Amino acid sequence: MALVTILLPTYNRAHFLPHAIESALSQSFTDIQLIILDDASPDDTPGAVRPFLEDTRVRYVRHGENKGITGNWRFGLELVDTEFFCLLEDDDIFGPDFVERMIKPLQNDRELILSFCDHWAIDAVGKRNHGLTSMMSRQFGRSQRQTGPVKDLAEAALITGSVGITATMFRSAFISSDFIRDEAAGGIDYWLLYQCVRTGRTAYYLSDRLMEYRLHGAGMSHSMPEMMARGHLFLYEEIVRDPNFVRLHEAARRKLHYTATCYGINLLTSHRPEEAVNLLAEALRYGFTARAYVAYRLALWEKGRVLAHSLRRIKQQAAQTVLPILFQYSVMNIGLLRLAKRLTHGIFFRH
């Protein structure tokens, strides 16, 4: 049996997928199994996978119907039967020594639940962006970290965002498919890390860049921003309610405020003011910034303007449809009354 499972969930990424598969099968550490989880992709994913199926380490699972990201991940976790596993996104690339380097800390310390590393940022064609890479390393606190044990995994994973899900190796004994929640879909990577933190286990960081993270217009942050926002709101609301993470509550509230503000502004610019008002009110409940307040007032104004417009349309439609019908009904009733009057007169006042 292999020592490491590489789970590769994929959906509609046949053009990127071969690069991810090649990077998994080209590892210097060869005692691996690669499980490709095709979530009923409508493109030619089966054709993209076919050339790699001769490698006995590859297992290809194609779902008959779409399970969604959470269902696909949960299904994959249930298939893991090795001591270690990692998740490779279908548009990312592992460096050739990723697995070899990442399992060593876990082998040396059985209390570790995961190890993670820094990574490169690449564009749609696979070119490394050195400036963006450095900026992201600073932004997510990786450039300030030294190789070694992580003192505060909760802060690193959930607040600073240092732990990239595709740049992580997990010890499977401490992780269950029950860690996956459907409500966290757009933030499923952070949610999985949150469950890891809740075990009380520790982590190890390698400061070398051992994989490549692809940034492109079809990524989730670009194509499904609302799904991501809802997932992150669910995550940080859970953290705020978690009595075991009181020390993170204030930071989680700031995350909630920021996420709800951005999501609310997105809804406002998408001409959905009623939803925007509710979300921006929620943002202000977790904190106050001029940006959130101004957006909230604009959403209220836009909601009122839309309501007034709707009332005008109803009035116009009534004038065009309801009033003519009422008029015709009234004319008909007058006619019936006149007829009844004549009949009554004829019956009671005949000579």
Image (cartoon, rainbow, N blue to C red):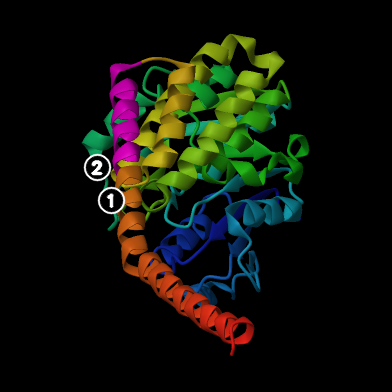
Crowd class of label 1 (few under 14; some 14 to 19; many from 20; radius 10 Å): some
Task: Indicate yes or no whether the magenta region holds residue 303.
Answer: yes
Q: What residue type is labelled 1?
A: Asp
What is the quadrant of residue 67 in the picture? Answer: bottom right
State the image coordinates of residue 136 (x, y, percent, origin top left).
Answer: 33, 31
Q: Are marks 2 and 1 in contact (CB under 8 Å)?
A: yes
Taking depth in this image into account, of 283 and 346 the one nearest to the observer is 346
Vertically, is 218 above or below 294?
below
Please state if 134 lies on the left or on the right of 70 as rendered: left
The magenta span reads 289-305
For the point 69% across and 51% down, the residue is 74
| Residue positioned most to the bottom | 351
Task: Indicate yes or no whether the magenta region holds residue 164.
Answer: no
Q: Is residue 251 visible?
A: yes
For the point 70% across and 50% down, the residue is 77
State the image coordinates of residue 202 (x, y, percent, origin top left).
Answer: 65, 21
What numbered label is drawn on residue 123?
1
Query: Which secondary structure is most common in the magenta stretch?
Result: helix
What is the quadrant of residue 351 in the picture? Answer: bottom right
Badge 1 element = loop
Taking depth in this image into account, of 69 and 132 the one nearest to the observer is 69
Vertically, is 27 above or below 113?
below
Please state if 173 lies on the left or on the right of 116 as rendered: right
Looking at the rendered image, the quarter that the N terminus falls into is: bottom right
| Residue positioned most to the top | 247
For the point 38% across and 70% down, the residue is 327
State the image coordinates of residue 313 (x, y, percent, origin top left).
Answer: 31, 56
Mark closer to the chain start, 2 or 1: 1
What numbered label is drawn on residue 129?
2
